[in-house]
Image (cartoon, coloured by chain):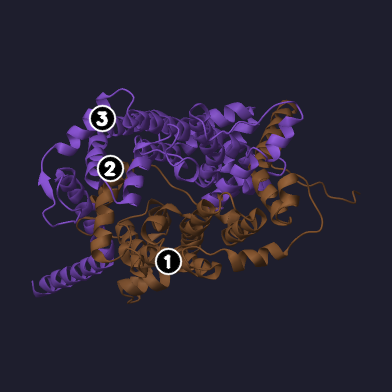
Amino acid sequence: MTLFKKKEVSVLYKRSKSEKIVFAVGFVVMAVFAFMLMYPYIFGVLSSLKEHGRAYMTDPVSVTLPFYFSNYKKAINSLVVNGHPYPVLLFNSIWYSMLGQLIPLVGTICSTYVVSRYKFKGHNFVYNLVIFTMILPIMSSGASSYRLMYKLGFIESPTILFSSLGSLCSLILYAFFKGIPQDYSEAAEMDGAGHFRIFLQIMLPQVIGGLSVIYISNVIAAWNDYSGPLLYLSKKYPTLATGMYIYEQQIIYSANQPVFFAGALIAAIPPVILFVVLQNTLMTKVYIGGLKG
Amino acid sequence: MMMSNKKKNTLSMRSIKMHIFCYLMMAPAVITFLVWYVYINFSSIAMAFQVMKPEGAYNWGNGAFDWGFGNFSYFFKELSLGDSMFNEAIRNSLIFFVCNTFLDLPFALIFCYFVYKKILGYNTLRVLIYLPNIVIGTVTSALFKQVIALNGPIAVFISHFGLEMPALFNTRETAMPSLVFYNFFYGIGGNFILLGGAMNAIPEETLEAAKIDGCSWFREMVQLVIPMCWPTLSTMLITAAAGLFSSSGPILLFTKGAYGTYTISYWMYEQLLNGMNLEISSAIGIVFTIIALPIVLSFKRFMFWIDDKIGV
């Protein structure tokens, strides 16, 4: 009688000797690559705990004691951009990324739902139009977008949140909605539910997982966007990303570098936490199909 | 007859209600599309033919422009000078396009495959490789600049071998290669989400059957995994091709176009930041849209031909 049951390994993960060697080499290459990617952040964390001046300038590489955790508090107090302190930059990042992605997402969900589930007049045209605009290499729209934003008063204003009310169809959302069996909506219709009720109480709950993933991905991208807010919001409503850029340009030679690193790392924390918590879902559940059909 | 008329009316009412529901749901997206795509692009075309008067103040809509081809002739005159900034910008844009599409994507595919095959520490490796795409670009670039600084850790390390760290982003010879390297290095992880999702959608039974038949890892990757991920890959390649002339790197964060690092899209962005030459910017955009359109459409056709060959 065996005391320990041997773990069943799928045939997919049973490896021959040569495969073990190949995958070991792959692991080493990826591990070295990952270390090289992470080194600047490790360096930043170690540097953020150093005393400004002699300790940082003479020995930027090694770990020095004691750790100056006070640099983080100093970062929150002293990083000021265009008269806006750190907490204001953080607040601007929060509303710009979270509300700024929620409003267009709601519009996109509504339009993608009807394009994927209903055969109304023009639904094929809309889908083909979306594919066509995706592959059209238009380059000239930046200047006229800026001019229109200026005329509508969106520049240096929170009303920029309403500049987009959603796109006609998102391919990822399209795949999610298309994957829901028609039986659900037919059964609900037979029970007397209207279209809005079917959408809100039956369809949306089924894709809420996927929608959350898309929303979080978009929030992370908006949080990290520095070029857009630099153009449209940098004077009155700078975000953390724009603020870090402007601050870095201002302090090139006179910086308290450890405090700057501390501020930079604080700015990086929220999306990193979100990602680490959701990384499995983000990396495995988002799927985009082909454009052909 | 009355019953069939009643039935027809009921069906027609249902259809009307369905259409009202659909059009109401589409309304916000349609408004956005009409304003931010249709109007903007027509406005761009109009702006391209607005030549600012030499004596006019820069005041939109107040008679400061003549209509003509002046913006286009300025651009083509600049192009005809062999060493102009625009020639350099076009070359750099194409370099970034090749790097983003034909270097980053294959490496990301191979790395994703290893993660998919669950090599040792695959979860941690996946998080670490994708992490730079989560961190603010300004933070990553600031830290990177400190690492390669003249008194940074790399300089200290190579000084032990008697070598000196060059100022990588401050010379014409090294600035562009350094930007391309940075873009390639930190761009690999950016494709992980879509490629990872595509690989996870592959039915395991298919790969198990191939494994039982003695399929090696290389054959599995080339003849099974890549073809089954092909719809996602072709979508990524087609949308990347649409960025043929708008490809760029983190120029704003490192060189701001100095030392021969301008790209077309960075130049356009710089004009927006400075509020200058917006009409010339529109004209240049239209020229490149016209040049890129047949290339992208042909590429799309080629991708669809491969789709047919693979059978997806």
Q: Which amino acid does label 1 sit on?
A: Tyr
Vertical placement of B154 versus A237: above or below? above
Residue located farthest toward the left when viewing the structure as drawn: B1
Using the numbered discs, state the Cα–Cα distance from disc 3 to disc 1 in whole angstroms: 38 Å
Element type at marker 3? helix
Asked which secondary structure carries label 1, the reply is loop
Q: Which amino acid does label 3 sit on?
A: Glu
Marks 3 and 2, Cα distance to the nearest angstrom? Answer: 22 Å
- Given residues A159 and A124, the one toward you in this image is A159
Q: How far apart are marks 2 and 1 (CA)?
A: 29 Å
Residue at 91% across, 49% down: A1
Residue found at the far top of this picture: B82
Report whether B164 appears left or right of B93: right
Where's the N terminus of chain B, which quadrant?
bottom left
Few, some or many C-alpha atoms within 10 Å of disc 1 (few <14, some 14-19, many ≥20)?
many
Q: B31 and A6: which one is in front?
A: B31
Q: Position of residue B46 (x, y in %)?
A: 15, 47
Q: Position of residue A146 (x, y in %)?
A: 28, 55
Q: Label 3 crowding class (10 Å Cα cut-off): few <14, some 14-19, many 20+? A: some
In the structure shown, which secondary structural element does the residue marked by tag 2 occupy?
loop
What residue is at 65 percent from the left and 59 percent from the top? A259
- Is residue A55 shown above or below B82? below
Residue B102 screen position, x and y as percent: 47, 30
Q: Is residue B195 visible?
A: no
Q: Residue A237 carries which label?
A: 1
Q: Residue furthest bottom?
A: A192
Q: Which mark is residue B139?
A: none
Q: Colour of chain A?
A: brown
Q: Name the residue under label 3.
A: B78
Q: Name the residue under label 2.
A: A138
User: The disc labelled 2 sits on which kind of residue?
Assistant: Ile
Of all chains in the rendering, the one displayed in purple is: B
